Image: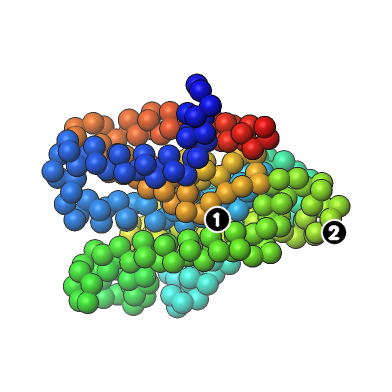
């Protein structure tokens, strides 16, 4: 590969935006069904709960770590909140408790990694098992159903999807709008604030960051708390759309989120990241998942193609880092 092509492919965010456009155009040319409004509604509904997890775990990956627990933490938090809801807790408090559970798991991961020095892979693998088991214990292995229709507490679903015709059409994915707003906020935090600069600095050179007087443990822990909070938010979004939370689920959610982060240009080595790229990465996977059935291809081919895209994304990251160090 010549130097010009290397420079083009090293600009990973430009590549993923172009890839998203090409994929959408390709599906549109193959089948007119893809251009229907319901298609884009389905894409939005399928993308935003994964996007919430991806936004949070972007901060962890920027530190050079990983969080394998976000998928099971999302469902565990929803199960605990749902169990309390069935016990009579008002929905506003249910949402607060759900977010608190996610934040506590994030704090646990952060302390294990930053204070006790555990590898993030091992710490979050343990948290993944703990959260999966805890969700089953608290719910007593029962499926938890959340309010629908005119039931008390069903209003929370409107935060993520319009359930009745009104100012906005029914099934309008308001959660996608919420996701965009939060993505902008977290993008500003990552790239324009002291918190983000310190988190990126940890990923670039942890020891140099410590020697410069920055409280590395504090900001590394904060990155995991972000991941836990957004995982819990993803759990709320999930039950708002699918109305139920089942024990022993959530495994695999984290892989979609992490793949979206890496495809979007955040380096697994840490030190660089983009919330915008993360959202584009998640959208690429979601468009493939929604688009394949329209052309008669089974959706599990998404995994095959996503794997190829993920490998290519990591290779582009390697090129980019070599170019910067040249």
The residue that mark 2 highlights is: 213
Residue 287's place in the image compared with 6, above or below, is below
Q: Residue at the front extreme?
A: 4
Residue 148: image location, x then y, percent = 29, 68
As rendered, which of 133 and 6 lies closer to the eye?
6
Disc 1 crowd rating (10 Å Cα; few below 14, some 14-19, many 20+) is: many
The local secondary structure at tag 2 comes to loop
The local secondary structure at tag 1 comes to helix
Answer with the quarter of the image where residue 31 lies.
top left
Q: Let me know if residue 22 appears in the view.
A: yes
| In-image side of 39 versus 11 (left or right) | left
Residue 248: image location, x then y, percent = 47, 46
| In-image side of 128 versus 260 (left or right) | right
Residue at x 20%, y 69% (from the top left corner): 169
| In-image side of 194 versus 129 (left or right) | right
| Mark earlier in primary sequence (2, 1) | 1
Q: Residue at the left extreme?
A: 32
Disc 2 crowd rating (10 Å Cα; few below 14, some 14-19, many 20+) is: few
Residue 213: image location, x then y, percent = 85, 59
Residue 222's place in the image compared with 69, above or below, is below
Residue at x 60%, y 59% (from the top left corner): 191
Q: Let me know if residue 221 appears in the view.
A: no
Residue at x 22%, y 39% (from the top left corner): 27
């Amino acid at each position: 590969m010549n130097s010009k092509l290397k420079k083009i492919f090293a600009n990973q965010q430009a590549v993923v935006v172009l890839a998203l456009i090409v994929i959408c155009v390709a599906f549109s040319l193959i089948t007119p069904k893809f251009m229907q409004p319901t298609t884009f509604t389905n894409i939005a509904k399928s993308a935003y709960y994964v996007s919430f997890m991806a936004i949070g775990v972007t901060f962890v990956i920027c530190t050079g770590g990983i969080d394998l627990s976000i998928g099971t933490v999302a469902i565990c938090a929803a199960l605990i909140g749902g169990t309390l809801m069935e016990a009579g807790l008002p929905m506003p408090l249910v949402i607060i408790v759900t977010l608190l559970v996610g934040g506590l798991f994030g704090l646990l991961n952060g302390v294990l990694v930053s204070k006790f020095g555990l590898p993030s892979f091992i710490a979050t693998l343990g948290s993944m098992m703990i959260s999966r088991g805890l969700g089953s214990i608290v719910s007593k292995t029962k499926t938890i159903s959340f309010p629908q229709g005119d039931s008390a507490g069903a209003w929370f679903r409107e935060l993520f999807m319009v359930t009745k015709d009104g100012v906005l059409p029914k099934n309008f994915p308001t959660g996608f709008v919420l996701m965009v707003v939060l993505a902008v906020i977290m993008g500003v935090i990552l790239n324009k604030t002291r918190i983000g600069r310190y988190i990126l600095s940890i990923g670039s050179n942890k020891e140099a960051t410590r020697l410069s007087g920055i409280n590395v443990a504090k900001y590394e822990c904060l990155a995991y708390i972000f991941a836990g909070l957004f995982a819990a938010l993803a759990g709320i979004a999930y039950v708002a759309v699918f109305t139920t939370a089942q024990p022993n689920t959530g495994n695999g959610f984290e892989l979609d989120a992490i793949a979206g982060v890496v495809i979007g240009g955040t380096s697994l080595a840490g030190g660089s990241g983009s919330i915008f790229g993360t959202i584009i990465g998640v959208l690429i996977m979601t468009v493939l998942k929604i688009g394949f059935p329209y052309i008669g291809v089974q959706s599990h081919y998404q995994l095959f193609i996503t794997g190829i895209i993920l490998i290519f994304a990591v290779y582009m990251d390697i090129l980019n880092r070599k170019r910067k160090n040249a």
